[in-house]
Image (cartoon, helix red, strand yellow):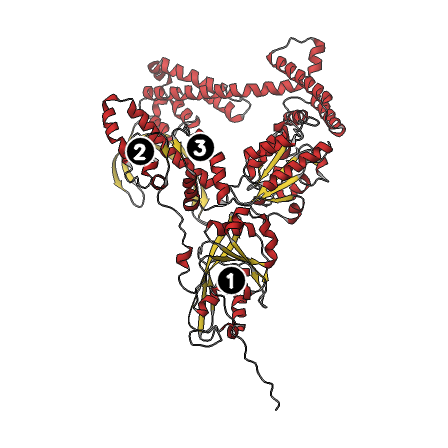
């Protein structure tokens, strides 16, 4: 309730566009509110004056009373003002005020000038006694002085740096100026520059690169260290020295040893192994062979990346992986120009610097997932890297000189070629890596995956046994994929469950007082061959110490992994007319695709659901048009017995898994078979799957992805597959054991498809001979 009385000296302002005024006042004294008389239209109160104006007149008396406190305050105030720049008029005026004003007025004046919070200013205002006011203001002055001292210390090194720029090294050496610590550092830097120049001259870089480096080192010698360009130039020269211009590793060209190594690392993948051995054979005959540019295309989890590492190991070369997934800046490939802040070379040059040789194996992973943005198209930048006719003089924007990439073995991986630009695809040698069959997965699991999981979980074959029948159950009932990643995770889950039992068994063996109890309950939980038919139902009993080795059978599998995720539901879903099985290709491998149809009274509309693309919708319209034109021939009628199948009838076609986008022409024969089943009332054979494009004349055209589709049908337990006649050549890529398990029907027209899809064929009603009228 303490305030300041003041006189209004000046009022400046206006009422337009809104009222705003500035008030200039002169403070008189402190006062205290005794009683508030009224609040509106403005406050009126009874006040008491706290400090008197006339007390400033008796200056000598007040100085005697305050004594040393006043002198101490004055000394700090002078020290603070003299630390400021006296050339500023306001500072000079403040210095004169300190000498002219009474000492009693100084605390109030300096508190308003120095940096203080509002709370501290209010505390000074509340301090009515002079002695108390001096005591509260002195710490604020001391704090401000310490802050100024600290600020001046931080500014001194910068001034020294500015002076040091003027000094030049040669002058100091000639005049024999005594060296300081900073000078010694400059001497060391100069020695480093000399060493760098020596490295440049002894390196085996190209003539063009050597010319550029010598020019840059000459500029570096004349450049002060404080310049920003000094560090940039030095980094550039160090990179040029570190690059492997002529350094390479010697290839291991023994074909027999390479074949053994590839077979040990990877099962199947015959195409890949054959291509690597061909390269080795040609390298034996010709030393300066350019590195091939391969592209492995296949579903995830089939070993595209790991086989690239194996190829490098087989050749005895360095390996470097460059992940391209999500890259949307061409500077990642070509680098930034050195004029930019934070510039750096691209991933290709960085990779060469990392491996230290000019003939490594570069794996360009996920080349089909490159992006495009305002920073350019990295796929277009890769055109120069992956072109054998151009990459012998690849120019990175950061280096700005040509570098030879012709000895690098580039291997790209992709899940699909659909998203790779045609120009980039044309520069690569495509090698398809299809999904694995069940037999191949079993072999891979027992040769590679199970030993790896046992090692990772600290188990031995004497503690756990996973028979091939169990592995087959995991493959068919718990995973449904083209690769083996999910299979690897399931085997890891089994190993973790067994590790828990083994660890608990060891823990209980260390407690002799519970040994008898463990022996009494041990018989409940032994997973041996004699108890394969018994289910391990109690999870708590699994923790008891078992006898070794633990055999993983179907019942143990169910307890560890839960109920099977996939069941053979094909026969159940084909229990009524209007359902057929198609085969689809996805980047993740082949898939079984059901097609369902139903009809109801309506206006002759065709409804399509299941998130279908335009091509698949056109296939459905083609199918219904072909069936309508051949309805009399096959005796197909709608619910009212009419041969016009859409007469007062609506047809609904649905493709299950509605969240997945589907497109492509290969579902044409499946849609025809499904609609023929619906209108004839006959069931499609439950073990038949089909694929093929149709035409309006009833021809069956070839489609792609036959191997992946056949493997999907084999995984689903289907025995017969209808494929186009012109796809017969693709069956040679399928493993012999899969071909022996299945029957393939080669169809060139829809009549052959329908005859193969229904039991007893799909009879065509013979046309009655008609006599020509003579009228």
The circle on residue 756 is: 1
Image location (x, y in percent) of residue 47: 28, 33
Q: CA distance from mark 2 to mark 3?
A: 23 Å
Query: Is label 2 in contact with label 3 (beta carbons under 8 Å)?
Result: no
Q: Quarter of the image holding residue 597? A: bottom left
Q: Is residue 599 left or right of residue 240?
A: left
Query: Is label 2 in contact with label 1 (beta carbons under 8 Å)?
Result: no
| Residue neighbourhood size for the residue with mark 1, other residues' Cα within 10 Å, grouped as few (<14), some (14–19), many (≥20) | many
- The residue positioned 46% from the left and 66% from the top of the image is 677
Compared with 772, 193 (above or below) is above
2 or 3: mark nearer the eye = 2
Q: Earlier in the sequence, mark 1 or mark 3?
A: 3
Q: Earlier in the sequence, mark 2 or mark 1?
A: 2
Q: Nearer the viewer, residue 596 or 219?
A: 596
Image location (x, y in percent) of residue 553: 37, 39
Q: Is residue 651 left or right of residue 334?
A: left
- The residue positioned 45% from the left and 41% from the top of the image is 486
Name the residue carrying label 2: 526
Q: Earlier in the sequence, mark 2 or mark 3?
A: 3
| Residue neighbourhood size for the residue with mark 2, other residues' Cα within 10 Å, grouped as few (<14), some (14–19), many (≥20) | many
Residue 671 is at least partly visible in this image: yes
Name the residue carrying label 3: 453
Looking at the rendered structure, the secondary structure element under dot 3 is: helix
Q: Is residue 678 left or right of residue 379?
A: left
Residue 331 is at least partly visible in this image: no
Looking at the rendered structure, the secondary structure element under dot 1 is: helix
């Amino acid at each position: 309730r303490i305030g300041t009385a003041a006189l209004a000296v000046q009022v400046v302002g206006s009422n337009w566009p809104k009222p705003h005024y500035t008030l200039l006042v002169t403070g008189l004294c402190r006062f205290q509110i005794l009683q508030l008389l009224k609040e509106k239209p403005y406050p009126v109160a009874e006040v008491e004056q706290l400090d008197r104006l006339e007390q400033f007149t008796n200056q000598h008396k007040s100085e005697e009373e305050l004594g040393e406190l006043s002198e101490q305050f004055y000394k700090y105030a002078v020290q603070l003002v003299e630390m400021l720049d006296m050339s500023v008029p306001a500072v000079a005026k403040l210095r004169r005020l300190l000498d002219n004003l009474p000492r009693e007025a100084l605390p109030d004046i300096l508190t308003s000038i120095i940096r203080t919070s509002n709370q501290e200013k209010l505390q000074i205002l509340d301090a009515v006694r002079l002695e108390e006011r001096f005591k509260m203001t002195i710490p604020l002055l001391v704090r401000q002085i310490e802050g100024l001292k600290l600020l001046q210390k931080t500014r001194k090194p910068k001034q020294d740096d500015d002076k040091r720029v003027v000094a030049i090294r040669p002058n100091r050496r000639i005049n024999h100026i005594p060296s300081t610590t900073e000078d010694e550092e400059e001497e060391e830097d100069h020695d480093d520059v000399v060493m760098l120049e020596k490295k440049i001259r002894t390196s085996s870089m190209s003539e063009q690169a050597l010319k550029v480096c010598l020019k840059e080192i000459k500029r570096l010698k004349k450049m002060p260290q404080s310049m920003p360009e000094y560090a940039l130039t030095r980094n550039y020269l160090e990179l040029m020295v570190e690059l492997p211009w002529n350094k390479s590793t010697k290839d291991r060209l023994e074909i027999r040893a390479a074949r053994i190594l590839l077979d040990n690392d990877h099962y199947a993948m015959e195409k890949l192994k054959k291509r690597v051995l061909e390269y080795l054979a040609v390298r034996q005959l010709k030393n300066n062979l350019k590195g091939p540019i391969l592209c492995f295309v296949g579903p995830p989890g089939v070993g595209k990346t790991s086989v690239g590492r194996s190829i490098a190991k087989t050749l005895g070369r360095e390996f470097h992986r460059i992940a391209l997934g999500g890259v949307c800046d061409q500077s990642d490939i070509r680098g930034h120009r050195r004029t930019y802040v934070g510039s750096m070379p691209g991933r290709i040059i960085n990779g060469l610097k990392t491996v230290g040789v000019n003939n490594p194996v570069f794996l360009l992973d996920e080349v089909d997932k490159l992006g495009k943005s305002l920073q350019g198209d990295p796929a277009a930048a890769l055109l120069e890297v992956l072109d054998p006719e151009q990459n012998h003089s690849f120019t990175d924007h950061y280096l700005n000189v040509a570098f030879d990439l012709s000895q690098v073995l580039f291997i790209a991986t992709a899940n699909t070629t659909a998203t790779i630009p045609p120009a980039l695809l044309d520069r690569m040698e495509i090698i398809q890596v299809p999904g694995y069959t069940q037999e191949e997965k079993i072999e891979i699991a027992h040769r590679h995956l199970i030993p790896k999981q046992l090692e990772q979980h600290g188990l031995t074959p004497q503690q756990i046994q996973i028979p091939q029948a169990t592995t087959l159950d995991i493959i068919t009932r718990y995973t449904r994929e083209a690769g083996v990643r999910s299979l690897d995770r399931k085997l890891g889950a089994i190993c973790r469950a067994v590790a828990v039992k083994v660890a608990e068994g060891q823990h209980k063996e260390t407690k002799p007082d519970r040994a008898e109890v463990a022996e009494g309950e041990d018989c409940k939980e032994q997973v041996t061959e004699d108890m394969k038919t018994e289910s391990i139902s109690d999870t708590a009993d699994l923790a008891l110490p078992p006898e070794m080795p633990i055999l993983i059978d179907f019942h143990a599998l169910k307890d560890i992994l839960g109920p099977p995720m996939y069941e053979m539901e094909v026969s159940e879903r084909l229990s009524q007319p209007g359902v057929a099985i198609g085969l689809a290709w996805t980047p993740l491998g082949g898939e079984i695709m059901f097609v369902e149809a139903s009809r109801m009274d309506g206006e002759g509309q065709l409804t399509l659901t299941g998130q279908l693309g335009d091509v698949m919708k056109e296939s459905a319209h083609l199918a219904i048009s072909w069936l309508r034109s051949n309805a009399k021939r096959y005796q197909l009628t709608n619910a009212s017995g009419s041969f016009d199948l859409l007469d007062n009838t609506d047809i609904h076609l649905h493709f299950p898994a509605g969240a997945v986008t589907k497109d492509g022409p290969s579902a044409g024969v499946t849609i025809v078979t499904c609609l023929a089943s619906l209108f004839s009332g006959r069931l499609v054979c439950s073990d038949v799957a089909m694929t093929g494009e149709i035409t309006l004349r009833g021809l069956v055209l070839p489609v792609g992805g036959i191997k992946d589709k056949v493997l999907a049908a084999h995984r689903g337990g289907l025995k017969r597959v209808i494929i186009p006649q012109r796809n017969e050549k693709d069956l040679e890529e399928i493993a012999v054991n899969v071909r022996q398990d299945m029957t393939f029907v080669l169809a060139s027209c829809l009549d052959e498809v329908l005859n193969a899809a229904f039991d007893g064929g799909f009879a065509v009603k013979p046309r009655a001979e008609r006599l020509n009228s003579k009228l």
